[in-house]
Image: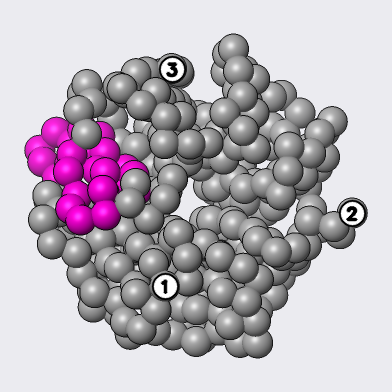
Amino acid sequence: MQFSGTTQNLLGVWASSATDVFAVGEGGTIVHYDGDRWSVQASPTGAPLWGVWGSSPTNVFAVGGAGTILHFDGTAWRAQDGVPPSFLSGIWGASARDVFVVGSTESATPTAIILRYDGTAWSAETLAATPHLFRVWGASSTSVIAVGVNGLVVRYSGLRWTREHDAGVLVYLRGVWGSSANDVYAVGAVMDGLGGATSLVLHYDGARWASLANPSMANLALADVWGASSTDVFAAGFPAVGDGGPLQGAILRYDGRRWRQEPAGAFGPLAAVWGRGGDVFAVGAAGVIVRGSPVDR
């Protein structure tokens, strides 16, 4: 476990390399790792930040509540203009001039919102009324997938967004990642209506989405997923219900054949996971940052 320099809950993480890692969280918190230590960066917002992504170390975006989109140019973070009132939680880009952000509108009956950046301005994508979207990932600018409430999966083909999966109420998909357009994982939880949950992993093989039974764990909600390859995938999460003791996070790992839980460490609930350059970083409650390596088997 690494010291992040903050006790704020961290909700998103992205890295351009093992010596250039950004994590964001509540209170507008932004922390950066330079390969030696984590340091807190000046943030122009106090809104919670849920997602972070960049095309390079000098072109990084962070998104969050109150329609917040921040941009980092390598020197300072600045707020972006022209963003509609919204709650934004996921971001991914095909390039510096083609970036997708997902979340929901701020209204009496919130519906999903997808914003797209062309290098100059943000605009809203056309999307049929759907519930909140949590995260987004793409294999290319013409193959983008977003996941969210009710087990919803929507896909962008380069022409339009279409629903690809919908599991109904009490199913939440909070993370998505793939090694290719035909090898995609979405993670979340199936709620029992009483406060408990069972972890859920869906896999897309190019033809259909199917639930993977072997990673299902009672009282565990998965929050995010990232992989070094199609045979080394990490999912991070948190317990749905506490037992009165300290809440512990969980990391599941897939080797191409089966999932297993990584040895538990003294860390709290985890909200996001990302890796680069032989390192994996998972972030979560009270500024916790857990670092591992895809080669550690």
Left or right: 182 as drawn, with respect to 101:
right
Residue 171 is left or right of residue 61, and the answer is right
Circle 2 SS class:
loop
Residue at image coords 53%, 36%: 139
> Which range of residues does the magenta coloring cover?
99-124
What is the number of the mark on residue 20?
A: none
Give the Cα distance between marks 2 and 3: 34 Å
Residue type pointed to by label 3: Glu
Q: Quadrant of the N terminus?
A: bottom right
Q: Between marks 1 and 2, how big is the CA–CA gap?
A: 34 Å
Whether residue 204 is visible, yes or no, is yes
The residue singled out by tag 2 in the image is 297
Q: Which badge, 1 or 2, comes first in the chain's sequence? A: 1
Colour mapping used in the image: one colour
Which residue is labeled 3 in the image?
164
Please tell me which residue is depicted at 44% across the width and 61% down the height of the picture: 54
Instruction: Check if residue 104 falls in the magenta segment.
Output: yes
Q: Which mark is residue 58?
A: 1
Secondary structure that dominates the magenta span: strand
In contact (CB < 8 Å): disc 3 and disc 1: no
CB contact under 8 Å: marks 1 and 2: no
Q: Is residue 213 left or right of residue 117?
A: right
Front: mark 3 or 1: 1
Residue 3 picture location, percent across and down: 60, 83
User: Which residue type carries mark 1?
Assistant: Thr
